[in-house]
Amino acid sequence: MVNKIKGKMQKPLPEFLKEYDLPIGLFPQDATNYELNEDTKLLTVYIASPCEVGYKDSSVLRFSTNVTGYLEKGKLTHVEGLKTKILIWTKVTEVSTEATKVHFAAGMNKTRNREAYEVVRDGVVVAKF
């Protein structure tokens, strides 16, 4: 079987996210490959198939097979390939952190406790992103 996941492994994704002050469990368990363009700081995270991840605060994120965004310390901006459910599925455009909070800009801003995203979880396969 051919591995369809792109990207290359530099260091484990949770460790990489921690260096940028982002929660280690922001992406699903099978999102192990990623690429960072050092010049533009464009991060691309590769996921085997579209999936949803439920977090311990009852929030749910939906991931496409590629999630991209511009990486800064404590922030991922111009995000593509990520949605959250507020009342309906809404495209997430930015993720940022502060001490105990994770902020999601998604049509409207949503702040959640960071602790819920500090455990790497399995994604549940969904039919479409």
Image (cartoon, grey):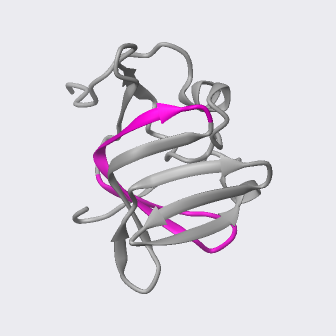
> Is residue 45 rendered magenta in the image?
no
Image coordinates of residue 127 in percent, x first then y, are 23, 65
**Left or right, 52 with reference to 57:** left
Image coordinates of residue 1 in percent, x first then y, are 21, 27
Give the residue at x 40% y 60%: 92
Instruction: Report whether residue 70 is seen.
Output: yes
As drawn, the residue found furthest toward the right would be 99
Please tell me which residue lies in front, 69 or 60: 69
- Dominant SS of magenta comes to strand
**Left or right, 58 with reference to 71:** right
Give the quarter of the image for residue 125: bottom left
Give the residue at x 53% y 61%: 104
Please tell me which residue lies in front, 2 or 29: 29
> Is residue 63 rendered magenta in the image?
yes
**Left or right, 74 with reference to 80:** right
Label total for image:
0
Q: Is residue 39 above or below residue 45?
A: above
Tell me the magenta residue range.
Answer: 50-73
**Quadrant in which the C terminus appears:** bottom left
Give the residue at x 35% y 75%: 89
Give the residue at x 48% y 42%: 76
**Left or right, 102 with reference to 46:** right
